[in-house]
Image (cartoon, rainbow, N blue to C red):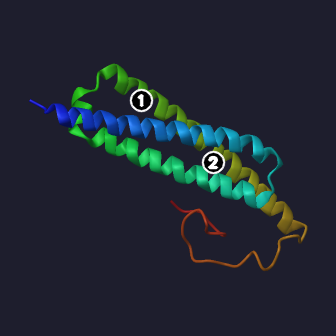
Amino acid sequence: MVSEDFIKLFAANLTNWVEAQKNFLNSASVIEKELEKADRLELVLATRAAFAHIVKTVEAFDKWLQDPFIVGHMPREMLVEIQKSVWEILKKLLELDIKHTSEFRDLILQLAESGKLHPLLFIPRERGGREDRFSISY
């Protein structure tokens, strides 16, 4: 039998997580309104902060679904809801990535053709991931 203290602590931890997520959501909503007037640096910083929180949340959710205690008690209906929601997020993220990368590629080609690429910002790098300026390999 699971101790009552364990259940209370477990429930308190879940409540703390939910409250922290609500606070971040509220902060993000407030900041989002301010971003309408943001400069380029603020937009980059805000996007990177969002990515950092997304990664933190995804990693926590992944750990959550690896925990036998959690999945052993989670009804199939909840798992179906999670799977469908995560797949919608995945598709939306992939659509954004495809759109953004394609548009940026076209912009770079246009700037290169018109001789407007900034020479100090276009430094060849080793082949790698997304940051590679000559090719993207996954």
The x, y position of residue 49, in whole percent, is 60, 54
Mark 1, residues whose alpha carbon is within 10 Å: few (<14), some, or many (≥20)? few
Name the residue tied to disc 2.
97
Tell me the number on the disc at residue 64.
none
Label 1 and label 2: CA atoms lie apart by 22 Å
Instruction: For mark 2, give the secondary structure.
Output: helix
Q: Secondary structure at mark 1?
A: helix
Please identify the quadrant where the N terminus is shown.
top left
Q: Residue furthest top?
A: 77
Dividing the picture into quadrants, the one containing residue 114 is: bottom right
- The residue where tag 1 is placed is 82
Where is residue 54 drawn, in percent x and y? 52, 47
Q: Is residue 28 above or below residue 83?
A: below
Across and down, in percent, residue 68 comes to: 21, 38
Q: Is 56 situated left or right of 104 in this image?
A: left
Rate crowding at label 2 as few (under 14), some (14 to 19) or many (20 or more) other CA atoms within 10 Å. few
Residue at 33% across, 45% down = 63
Is residue 95 visible from the viewing direction of this image?
Answer: no
Q: Is residue 1 above or below residue 136?
A: above
Q: Work out whether residue 101 or residue 55 is closer to the camera in this orientation and state it.
A: 55
Occupied quadrant, residue 125: bottom right
Front residue of 77 and 113: 77
In which image quadrant can residue 6 be found?
Answer: top left
Pointer 1 or 2: first along the chain = 1
> Along the horizontal axis of the image, is 121 left or right of 57?
right
- The residue lying toward the viewer, choosing from 12 and 57, is 12
Kindly identify the amino acid type of the residue bearing the numbered disc 1. Answer: Ile
